[in-house]
Every structure is written in C-alpha cells, then in structure tokens.
Image: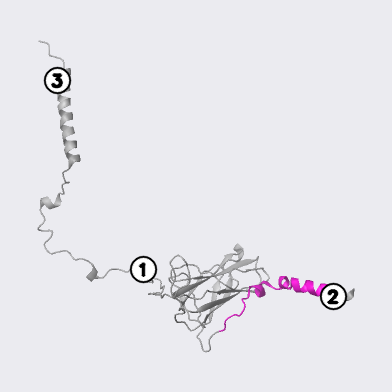
Amino acid sequence: MRTTLLRSLVALVAAGGPALLPAAALAAPSGAPTPSPGAETVTRAGTSFLTATTIAAGQPVQVRASTGDYLYWSFSAEAGQVHDVAATVSFPRDRSGASTWTLEVFDGLRRRQACTDGAQTPTVDKAAGSVSLGCTLREVRPWAEPWSGDPLPGTYFVRLSVVDVPEPDLGAPVDVELLVAADGEGGTPADDGELSTPLVPNTRPGAVLTDAQVASPVDGEDDERGLGDLVTLPALGSRWIWTTAGGILAAVAGVVGFALTRRPRRG
C-alpha cells in the first residue's frame, strides 16, 4: 500500500513539474545558440526597419533599453541555412504586474516569417526577473512562388517588443541580450530554381533625381510661342456642332415667340 502511494506521488510530481517551474525556464528555447569566438559585441539597436542595426550570425548583442521600446536588428541569410534567434530580457523585480513580450522575424519584403521552435510570445509574472524568447526559422529556399511566403535569400529583420504591460511599468529600464545563429554553410540545395536577386529592402527611398535625368528646356522656346500656342482651342466634333445649332435655334425661337406674343401699339 505504501509503495503504491509513493508511486502515485512520484507520478503526480512528474506530471505537474513543468507547471511549478518559473516562467523564464518555460520560455527558454531548446538548444540556445552560442556566440562565435572573438565576435564583437553589438551595443545598439534600431527603432524601425530603416534604422535597424546590422549584425552577423554568431555576433552577440547587449543593449540597454526601456520597456515599451521597439528594437530592430537585421542580418543576411543565404539559401540552405536555418537561423535560430534567441533573446533574453532582464528587468527589475519591483514591477506592478505580468508582461508579455514578443520576438518577430521579417524578410526583405517585411513579411512576417513563421517560427518552427522557440517561445515567440511568452508571458511572465511580476515576480520574474527575466524572460527568454526564441525563434527558429525555416530553411531558406533558393526560390519560391510569390504567394507562398517561404523564406528566401536576402536581408531579415528581428523585432523585439512588449505587447502587454501595465502602464506603471512603461519606461522601466531593461537589459536585452540577443544572438542569431546560422546552421549550414549556405549554397543552393537540391531545388529546381534560383532567386535572381536577394530580397534586400530599398534603404534609399525618395532619392532626388540628378541633373542628367531632368529634361532641360530648349533655348528660345518661350520666345517663339505665339498667341495661337498660348490659347488652346478644343477640337471640333459632333458635340460642339449640335451645341451651336441648338443655341441658334433657341435664339430664333425666342425672337419668333416674342414677335407673336407682343401686343400691337394703339394709335
């Protein structure tokens, strides 16, 4: 009887063990990537897609930010690679409530890519001191149909932000650590196709045209223009003919009607 009770207790603890772990341990991705030896640490982050900080695979990131900030990084991907993105956010323990964080990855066309592994949107209670996020991307393909949304070679963006946080906790300082790891040497896998140009976003929108691209006016063109060039007459057509004829007939009908209805003068 005692042995049966002990076995039941062990099975109950084993089944409920994950529920007793802290939220940070639950959010930790399996097989977290490690930095490359001798890689320089990046200490900044962008605030939009256009200002995203460029990093390389295996290059660690350590940034001091505030709760509510949108942090952006970008990295290059080649066909045949599988990328793992891992991030850890540390914050003060004296917080007013739970918070939910999210880690998103976009391709060069700013399409959000699906994650095959990792805690992409974990929620931690106010007693936790950190939260771990992760995202494992699908293998980069050398080509794909435009409607498929498959990952293609080019530039990818990582965005880290908080999606749900109590208002008193906004602006609180946080320490962010991020690392992108690439599995595979790249190259074209066994696939019957190849992308002609990598998906790289246009980082120079609204460029001013050069003088060579602007058509210059011909000298003396304004002096040679006469009154006939300044006044543009509409082309004559059936619409204008019927309009003119209708106006003349209306004037004639008005004169005839006035003559018929006019009273004769008395002598």
Q: Which segment did they paint magenta?
A: 6-34
Q: Which mark is residue 102?
A: none
Closer to the camera in the image, 203 or 148? 148
Q: How far apart are marks 3 and 2 (CA)?
A: 123 Å
Quadrant containing the C terminus in the rendered view? top left
Q: Residue 205 carries which label?
A: 1
Mark nearer the N terminus (3 vs 2): 2
Query: Which secondary structure, mark 1?
Result: loop
Q: Residue 6 carries which label?
A: 2
- Residue type indicated by callout 1: Pro
Quadrant containing the N terminus in the rendered view? bottom right
Instruction: Where is residue 203? Give x, y as percent.
Output: 39, 72
Closer to the camera in the image, 186 or 62? 186
Residue bearing the label numbered 3: 259
Query: Could you tell me which residue is drawn at 24 percent across and 69 percent down?
Result: 213
Marks 3 and 2: CB-CB under 8 Å? Answer: no
Closer to the camera in the image, 15 or 259? 15
Closer to the camera in the image, 245 or 87? 245
Magenta highlight: main SS: helix
Mark nearer the N terminus (2 vs 1): 2
Vertical side of 187 occupied by 218: above or below: above
Instruction: Where is residue 146? Give x, y as percent.
Output: 43, 66
Q: Nearer the viewer, mark 2 or mark 1?
A: 2
Vertical side of 242 occupied by 131: above or below: below
- Residue type indicated by callout 3: Ala
Give yes or no for residue 66 being in the magenta stretch: no
Instruction: Where is residue 24? Give x, y as percent.
Output: 65, 74
Q: How far apart are marks 1 and 3 (CA)?
A: 73 Å
